Amino acid sequence: MRILIVEDEKPLADVIKQGLYEEGYAVDVAYNGEDGLFMAENEPSDLMILDIMLPIIDGMTILKKIRKKGIKSPVLMLTARDALFDKVSGLDSGADDYLTKPFLFEELLARIRALLRRSSEVKTSMIEIGDLVINMATHEVKRSGKDIPLTAKEYALLEYMALNKNKVLNRTSLTEHLYDQDFNLDSNVIDVFINRIRAKIDRGSHKGLIHTVRGAGYMLKE
Amino acid sequence: MAVLLLTLSVLGGLLSFSLSKIVYDSIDSNLLSKATALATLVSMDVGDKTRFKFSDEITWEYNSPNARSFFQIRRLDGTTIEKSTSLGNRDLPFSKLDRQTSFEFITLGRRPARLINFHVPIENGELNMSKNKKNSLVIQCAEDIRFQVNLIKRYRIALFLSILSIVIVSTSGGFLIAHRALTPIKNISETIDKISESNLSERMSVDDIPQELRILASSFNRTFDRLEMAFIRQKQFAADASHELRTPLSVILSQSEIILRKDRTAGEYRNSLGTIKDAAIMMSEIVRKLLAIAKLSSDNVDLRFERVILSEIISESVKLLSPFAEHRGVGIDISPAKPLVVLGDRSLLSELFNNLIGNAIKYNVPNGKIYINLIKEPGLILTEIKDTGIGIPEDDLAKVFDRFYRVDKSRSRESGGSGLGLSICNEIVKLHNGRIEIKSRVDEGSTVSVYLKEDRDDTAI
């Protein structure tokens, strides 16, 4: 899952980026509204964290512009004022949620998870595909009741596939959603990760869940 | 009201007294002249000691049955020598008390009358007007004064009634006028009572108020305007302050949460504590400057004004900031200046120039320059601080003195800007009755001009 942070307070943006990165999210950061708008329009992201007060172009304008362009990824607004107007106009402009500073990072994570679920078919924090159970809140993965330890990146890839279960996901889209813009898209790192996850999940099981669709990509399916 | 009543009563008493005095004086002088005329007639006839002959011209006045004038001439023992027909069988009251001419009020046939007892001395059977002898005649003359008494009575009643009506009319009129005058004041006071924190923008409509109270109403309105502005500023300040503190607080919260999620290496802990420390420093800086501003803009700011040589203060600031300037490769050029003196608070002026020169370094380009000029103008000292820095966009120029306004937040945060420095400078200059201006061009630099009043008394230096 790839998240774009648009926040002009550099220390805060960097802290959020670090925290999300450690959670296994791919994170892009823009420190002003102009860069933020450009990245939102040109880089695919699964979620945007958008500060309202930004230099050059403010958050509300960015939101309106990207919604007008048909970009539907969920937007979580960060506001430093808990004035009702901010919340109302933020939600009216197409934001999906908001959080008032100062916030608990745990709450930010929970809201991000909820927003990501909302845009997929999965409606709880538990995803079940056959006997594979993914707990998105704790990042625990179990197959037939057995814990499967995964690295953050492995987990992120699995979670993304689980949220888009039964859909064929090509390498480019997987890379785009798992890596920020600093990553080189030509790499076959996705294949490496898929193989590692497959080894952990499907080994010793009579039924493989990760399917390779030749010429198209991968799919998580019961 | 009691004062009015008392004054009017005294006045009424005086008026009725003086009127009756005038009336009775004229009656008395009339009676005296009649008595004198009778005495003259008596003296002509005095040879015949028993009987006087009065001519008809004199007596017709006394003799008609309806006559209102009476006389009676007696000896000292009271025996009547002659009396007027108008008296009929009545006598004028007589007492032998004194020999002086005297006046008295009497009742004659149930009518009020005024009586004169006029003594005419007699010597050897002859009248002698000039001397006061033992023997004399008494000429009594009386006049019916019922008309005059009635007149005075009516006058007194009229006076009483008019005093009464004046008191009533003026009292009730006073109440009425006061009520009319007070009604708009009452309305004004009700409007004022209704104005509170939640509806500070409510105002009195001046058109509904009488002309003479409009000044009052509009000055109330102006006061409320000022109060509202102050209130809005306070609210804005509180909102801004909390807004500014929220961001570093978010950093501290998020960073500590993230770092505690799992075990870390010493390096990671060090890094995150560094981030937390920076945020805390930022917060304490904001709080320090907020307190400074609150103190500077309150009315009871403790100022220690003294004669300060401006170039000294500026040299001190430059010296203090030179390591910072060297670090950024910025050169500072101070034009040599005469020791110009201002009256000011030394520590505040230091703060002012530390801030301004600090900004000039902070927002300068690497290896940029700063030119500081002290210029004497009539009654003023102009300090120009010119930098070759990044400049301020025109749109932002008007707002740079606003609290928490930062032209480029991401840039100024890195250099430790809180958006309060220029606001503090502005407050300090205002406290010195001076003026501060900024001119700027993007990528060319900014020039800050500080005008301070010159202290002309050069003798102490």
Image (tube, coloured by chain):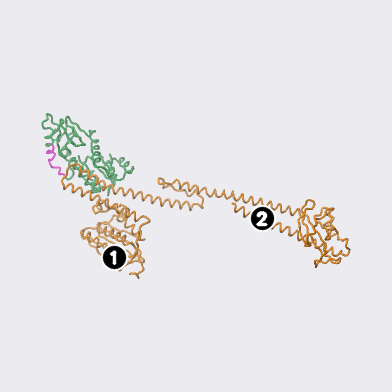
Chain colours: A green, B orange
Which chain is home to disc 1? Answer: B
Which chain is home to disc 2? Answer: B
Answer with left or right where residue A114 lies relative to residue B87. left
For disc 1, the marked residue is B312
Which residue is nearer to you in this view: A182 or A151? A151
Q: Residues within 10 Å of mark 2 (few under 14, many from 20)?
A: some
| Residue type pointed to by label 1 | Glu
x and y percentages locating residue B87 in the rendered image: 83, 54
The stretch drawn in magenta includes residue B428: no
Res. A222 in view: no
The range drawn in magenta is A183-194
Numbered mark located on residue B13 in the image:
2
**Quadrant occupied by the C terminus of chain B:** bottom left
State the SS at label 1. helix
Question: Residue drawn 37% across and 49% down?
Answer: B232
Eye-nearest disc, 1 or 2: 2
Of pointers 1 and 2, the one earlier in the residue sequence: 2
